[in-house]
Image: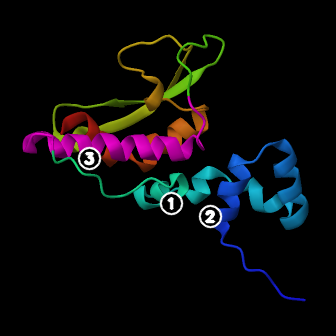
Amino acid sequence: MKTIELIQKNVLKAYREANPDGKKMLENLIGKEVFKQDITDRVKTYEDSLEETGRPNVLNFGDVPEDLVPFFHSVYRVIVEIEALNEGEKMDIYDSSKRRHYPYFACNGAPSGFAFIGSFCDNSSAYAGGGSRLSFKDEKTSNYFGKQFQKDMQDFLTK
């Protein structure tokens, strides 16, 4: 009998995109433990986020004024990281029954004084500072992002 070598990222992507019957079939074929890996074990860098989401690394900002390109790069980077950590789940700002968590950062006025403070939870109201693309499905993931990707968030807020 031939052994089939599966690439873990492809198997995990198939599992995420599968309906309940497809997920059960994959669990029966490969084993449930393969799919129980925590997202924070898989996504530790921006590159991991790209791999998790399938998003491209290089974008063309040719029509953006040159002085705004670093900002748009930082926005894209943070959004891809959050998308990866939310495992593709979209936060619906119109569903007030669903809680969203978001990291909170503070600055003491110096570049080295930018710090992750903690995560906060709010209903799905659309506040200017808590957009749905910048929120997380749970506090644990929000805290992880706040610590693991603090520099990227600082760039996002200051470029």
- Residue type beneath disc 2: Lys
Q: Which residue is mark 3?
A: 73
Residue 95 pos. (x, y %): 61, 13
Check residue 139 in the rendering and tell me which mark sits there, or answer none: none
Q: Which residue is mark 2?
A: 9
Q: Which of marks 2 and 3 precedes in the sequence? A: 2
Q: CA distance from mark 1 to mark 2?
A: 8 Å
Residue 15 pos. (x, y %): 73, 53
- Which of the pair 126/26 is nearer the observer? 26
* CB within 8 Å, label 1 to label 2: yes
Q: CA distance from mark 3 to mark 2?
A: 25 Å
Residue 158 pos. (x, y %): 20, 36
- Residue at x 75% of width, y 48% of height: 18
- Which of the pair 75/37 is nearer the observer? 75
Check residue 51 in the rendering and tell me which mark sits there, or answer none: 1
Q: Which of marks 3 and 1 precedes in the sequence? A: 1
With 43 as the anchor, is 10 left or right in this view?
Answer: right
With 31 as the anchor, is 7 left or right in this view?
Answer: left
Residue 154 in view, yes or no: no
Placement of the C terminus among the 4 image quadrants: top left
Q: Residues within 10 Å of mark 3 (few under 14, many from 20)?
A: some
* CB within 8 Å, label 1 to label 3: no
- Residue at x 56% of width, y 26% of height: 91
Q: Is residue 76 magenta?
A: yes
Residue 96 in view, yes or no: yes
* CB within 8 Å, label 3 to label 2: no
Is residue 89 positioned above or below 17 on the image? Answer: above
With 68 as the anchor, is 151 left or right in this view?
Answer: right
**Which stretch did the figure color magenta?**
63-90
SS assignment at label 1:
helix
Is residue 96 positioned above or below 146 on the image? Answer: above
